[in-house]
Amino acid sequence: MITELTIQNVATYTSPVNLSDIRKVNYIFGANGSGKTTIGRAIEQAIEHTDCKITWAGGSPLEVMVYNRDFVERNFNIQSPVRGVFSLGENQVQAEAEIAVLRPQIEQELRRIRGLNENLHGNEEQPGRKAELSTIENNLRDKAWIQKQKHDAYFQNAFTGVRNNAERFKERVLHEVSNNHAVLLDIDTLKSKATTVFSTALERAEPLPLIIVDDLLRFDSNQLLQKPIIGAQDVNISKLINQLGNADWVKQGLHFHQQTNNVCPFCQQSTTKEFSDNLGKFFNEEYENDIQEVIKLKENYVHAASTLETTLEIIKRVDSSFIPKELFAAEVDLLKDLLKRNIDQFTNKLKEPSRKLTLESVGQLASQLIFHITVANTAIEKHNQVVLNIAQEKLQLTSEIWKFVLAELQIDIAEYLTKKTNLQNTIQGMEQSLDGALTRKRQLEDQIKALEKQSTSVQPTKDAINNLLKTFGFTSFTIEIANDQGQYKICREDGSDARQSLSEGEKTFITFLYFYYLIKGAQTSDGTTTNRIVVFDDPISSLDSDVLYIVSSLIKSIFEEIKTQTGYIKQIFVLTHNVYFHKEISFSSKRSGNTPFAEESFWMVKKLSTGSNIERCSENPIKSAYELLWNEVKSPNQSSLTLQNTLRRILENYFTMWGGKSKDELCESFSGKDKLICQSLFSWVNDGSHSIHDDLYINHGSQTNDSYLQVFKQIFINANQVGHYNMMMGLPA
């Protein structure tokens, strides 16, 4: 049966409307144009209602049969004969017995199918296996998406194509699980490679120039720099100069001594020629050669230092990303300071040749700079190789990045794969069992169809319809078998076609009877015992009031079949706008007030400014005017001004209009005093209900009310209608 119905995007249902917890017997009331017919068509799944959704118990759809104007047009148009209704013949006892054996087997398979479908798809209480599978898929998707968001800033190029969709990102992760064979690298290495490989302005980089410090290093071992440069030791004055340790001072004064005609530049005294000759001999040719050699060494050192500094400045100006710029610049500054200090040492040596010169070695600082340059050039070489093979490098790096993502999701992926495998195996087993149950169900249904074909006929339905027509006074036409194909025709007594001359009431009644027997049979020789759902959409349109009760009685007989599970109709929907029909069809002497039975549901269809809406009612929402009259009689505080009119309307409706009994007939059922009271009651009723109450009107009072209420009850007792009185007064039967 149907457990839930959603109607949307059709007719006046502009917004989705949901009917849930639908029962076996469902009453739907609504005014004309409110959207009732759309409900029937949605259940029938008409072509234009494809957006409407039906939820079946256990996921097994049943045949749906709908009585509405569409059904009438399809089956009772003037151009085509009426298709026959096949049903089991009266003498097909054996076929019925065999079908009775097969039906429970089908029901057993249906229960198995429902159980498997609930395990697979779940129910309101717990999710099914497929929902569990969906949950673990979603869990992995969410965890994978966290990794994407975590690394997207650096690795968005590797995530191209799946960056904006969590589901596709998860699918890529699962693809990589089986296909990624890259080496696992750490995150810092990947980020460094991504900066180069995924750069939007990737160009070839020039190698950094090398620095040469061999010439500068050779100065560290030059002996002349450590040698004190002094004059000849075999000259008489040398002893004094060495004793005083002022050779450098004397050398400086010698230049002035030669320009002042042998006058000492320090004490301004005249010196002898011998003194001048001794000075000349002291600062001999060897001394001058050493001085010149120091000058030459200084020049060479300055040139080598300048060349080195120029190369380092070039490297700094390159602004290469492959070298640690700040550290390199700082070390260059340290080296330049060192070179400057060494050059100053040469200057001091020339000023004081007798001093020993010790140069600071450039070896350590130069080694550090050479290391930076070498590392940078190695990286540049790799970079340039990447530029030459950028497409392959991108593929390689992308694979390495996904390998890293897999490593971070390793535990989650392992858990996912284990659970998914177990669930898929379970689901596969259930689906195989479901296929087997469906196959067995089809085989059983095929056997029933074969039995039905052998034992069905259109004759029983024809006879049943004609009997009902005759019983209820429709004697001017009958339904007859038209041909060997089992089709019907509607005939007058003289055999002529009656369809064109039928009144609206006659047409409505004959089509209803046809549908009534169709839901118990089929328009083909098989399918007569198929489980089905029935929808009645305003079946009493154009019917007289007496026929209305015939129709309601036939439909209520279907209710009993559903409740007792004695037929093939498993669920019914009755849609109407007629208050009296609704009250009649929903009436039950066993009902407590307006409360629905467990197998029933009441609904109200309303057309609002925004479209149609359907509301579930906790009780029968329709109270007729007749029932409201009885509510006034039951009231403990009746008004003498209105009670007269209330009693008159009840008696006129029930006895005169519905029962066909006059006032005199009712009074004749009494004798003696009671007869007088009855006549008095009718006189009072007619007088009080039609007269104008003015200030001179004499109120009968509550005592008179009580007397006549007792006679009112007695009228029902004498007319053998006390059951109706008790029902309307809410008294026990």
Image: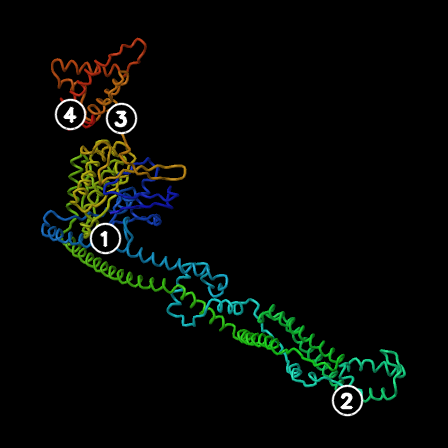
User: Where is mark 3, residue-wise?
Assistant: 628
What amino acid is found at the position of numbered circle 2 in the picture?
Ala
Q: Viewed as shown, does residue 425 lie left or right of 241? A: left
Closer to the camera in the image, 588 or 293: 293
What amino acid is found at the position of numbered circle 4 in the picture?
Val
User: Where is mark 4, residue-wise?
Assistant: 722
User: Where is mark 2, residue-wise?
Assistant: 232
Closer to the camera in the image, 573 or 450: 573
Q: CA distance from mark 1 to mark 2?
A: 125 Å
Circle 4 residues within 10 Å: few <14, some 14–19, many ≥20: some
Q: Earlier in the sequence, mark 3 or mark 2?
A: 2
Q: Earlier in the sequence, mark 1 or mark 2?
A: 1
Closer to the camera in the image, 338 or 151: 338
User: Where is mark 1, residue-wise?
Assistant: 114
Q: Earlier in the sequence, mark 4 or mark 2?
A: 2
Q: Earlier in the sequence, mark 1 or mark 4?
A: 1
- Residue 625, horizontal then vertical, whole percent: 27, 27
Reply above or below: 127 against 33. Answer: below
